[in-house]
Image (cartoon, helix red, strand yellow):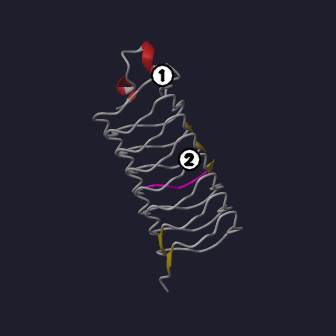
């Protein structure tokens, strides 16, 4: 049942409701793809291009998405729990009411991103860059934050990191 796609151009494709569980996709171009309600549980998206992808209600739980470009992508009610997004580019992404529990965002670039009311419990955020990011209303309980860049970041409380000691660590339990 497992499919393997390497270097495929699926940019702008209508992939709504598609079942891509456990699919291995290396260097696949999914930029501007409509992945609304897609099931990508356990998929490998190594070095994939998901720039400007529509991820509304998509399930990307347990995906291996290291080094992927998700810049300008986003969605509502996205499940990225336990996904590996280390070294990924999430600049200017917008996620609302989503689940990023236990996600690995170590060394990820989240500059200008928005995570409105998003759960990030037990997330690995080591050395992630949250410059100009907005985390208002998000739950970062027990997140691992060693080396995180908090520069002009809106903390879960709505406070600006620059006004509270250049960190949002005071909002983690």
Residue located 41% across and 63% down the image? 64
Indicate yes or no whether the magenta region holds residue 39.
Answer: no
Dividing the picture into quarters, in which one does residue 47 lie? Answer: bottom left
Residue located 35% across and 39% down the image? 143
Most foreground residue, 160 or 8: 8
Q: Is residue 96 visible?
A: no
Q: Which numbered tag is attached to residue 137?
A: none
Give the magenta-colored segment's residue range. Answer: 76-81
Indicate yes or no whether the magenta region holds residue 78.
Answer: yes
Label 1 belongs to which residue? Answer: 152
Instruction: Check the image and report above or below for 142 versus 70.
Output: above
Left-right relation of 17 to 139:
right
Q: Position of residue 29 (x, y in %)?
A: 57, 64
Q: Residues at badges 1 and 2 in contact (C-beta under 8 Å)?
A: no
Instruction: Check the image and report above or below for 13 versus 162.
Output: below
Q: Which numbered mark, 1 or 2, is in the foreground of this view?
A: 2
Q: What secondary structure is found at the residue carrying circle 2?
A: loop
Label 2 belongs to which residue? Answer: 71
Earlier in the chain: of badge 1 and badge 2, it is 2
Quadrant of the snapshot with the C terminus: top left
Q: How far apart are labels 1 and 2 at the CA level?
A: 19 Å
Q: Position of residue 38 (x, y in %)?
A: 62, 66
Left-right relation of 142 to 79:
left
Most foreground residue, 145 or 88: 88
Dividing the picture into quarters, in which one does residue 141 lie? Answer: top left
Q: Position of residue 124 (x, y in %)?
A: 34, 45
Bin the neighbour count of mark 1 within 10 Å (Cα to Cα): few under 14, some 14-19, many 20 and up: some
């Amino acid at each position: 049942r497992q499919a393997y796609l390497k270097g495929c151009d699926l940019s702008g494709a209508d992939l709504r409701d598609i079942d891509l569980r456990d699919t291995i996709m290396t260097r696949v171009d999914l930029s501007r793809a409509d992945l609304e309600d897609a099931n990508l549980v356990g998929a490998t998206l190594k070095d994939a291009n998901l720039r400007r992808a529509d991820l509304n209600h998509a399930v990307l739980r347990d995906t291996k998405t290291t080094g992927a470009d998700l810049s300008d992508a986003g969605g509502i009610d996205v499940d990225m729990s336990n996904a590996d997004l280390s070294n990924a580019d999430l600049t200017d992404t917008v996620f609302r009411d989503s689940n990023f529990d236990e996600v690995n965002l170590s060394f990820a670039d989240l500059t200008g991103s928005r995570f409105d009311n998003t759960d990030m419990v037990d997330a690995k955020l080591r050395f992630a860059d949250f410059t100009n990011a907005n985390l208002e209303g998000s739950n970062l309980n027990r997140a691992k934050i060693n080396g995180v860049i908090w520069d002009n970041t809106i903390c879960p409380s709505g406070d600006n990191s620059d006004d509270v000691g250049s960190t949002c660590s005071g909002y983690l339990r």
